[in-house]
Image: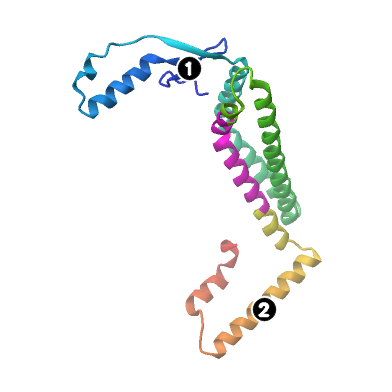
Amino acid sequence: MQNSPDTAVQLADDGVLSIDLGLVVERVKAELTTRGVGFADLIPVIDRSIPIAQADALVLVRTIYQIAVAAGFWLPWVVLGLVVAGVLLARNRPRALFWTSAAFAAAFLLLSAGMGIGRTFFIGAVSPSIMTSAAAEALFDEVTALLGSTIAALAMVGLLVAIWAWFAGSSRSAVAIRGVLGSGFSAIRGTWEGRGLSTGRLGLAVDRFHGPIH
């Protein structure tokens, strides 16, 4: 997918999937030499590739993959900058942060569902005419492993930020829950202090810098 010349399996621009025997033999020679096999140096250099499949769909997959890699470095920072600017310019920042994070999480959950649909479509398109369904599944999972885990992580981040923004908001339910939690923590702190347990300077520092900590 990265179009690297150092891989044993190569995909040509016309969709021919082939195995580079020369690279395979060189790696075998290196392994044999490492294990002390003396005749490994006598193995000749082979410059030959064996075509194993015609996979036009993989050319499109490789193109999309390379575009995603190229845009993947700077595009997230642009989106993050726009999100931060939108929240800072909003009149009600907690509400803006809540809806932005909730939409953020929903978008990545939809993207994850779309990847699942795309996986099914890809497997149906290339198997069994080009490769077996097991090979298609392994190929798709290998290409999208990092993307899938990143999508799941970002969806979780959006969900957690949305929950935090809701608790920090000015709605009646959020204010009521904060009041209950505050009263509960005050009661627990009072009970501990009555028994001689105190957070001391750490507690004072947390109370003083609670804004930056949040």
- Residue 70's spot in the image, x, y percent? 55, 27
**Residue 5 vs residue 54: left or right?**
left
The label shown at residue 10 is 1
Residue type highlighted by circle 2: Gly
Give the residue at mark 2. Answer: 184
Q: Residue at x 70, y 49 (%)?
A: 101
The amino acid at mark 1 is Gln
**Discs 1/2, front:** 1
> In the picture, which quadrant includes the C terminus?
bottom right
Residue 145 placed where, x, y %?
A: 56, 36
Q: From the viewer's perspective, tell me whether residue 3 is left or right of residue 25.
A: right
Is 154 above or below relative to 66? below
- In the rendered view, tell whether residue 112 sits above or below residue 52: below
Q: Residues within 10 Å of mark 1 (few under 14, many from 20)?
A: many
Q: Main secondary structure of the magenta part?
A: helix
Residue 14 vs 189, above or below: the answer is: above
Q: Earlier in the sequence, mark 1 or mark 2?
A: 1
Occupied quadrant, residue 94: bottom right
- Look at the image and give the residue range highlighted in magenta: 138-159
Question: Is there a contact, CB below 8 Å, between mark 1 and mark 2?
Answer: no
Residue at x 49%, y 80% (from the top left corner): 200
Q: Is residue 56 magenta?
A: no
Find the distance from the CA under tag 1 to the CA under tag 2: 64 Å
Q: Nearer the viewer, residue 100 or 36?
A: 36
Disc 2 is placed on an element classified as: helix
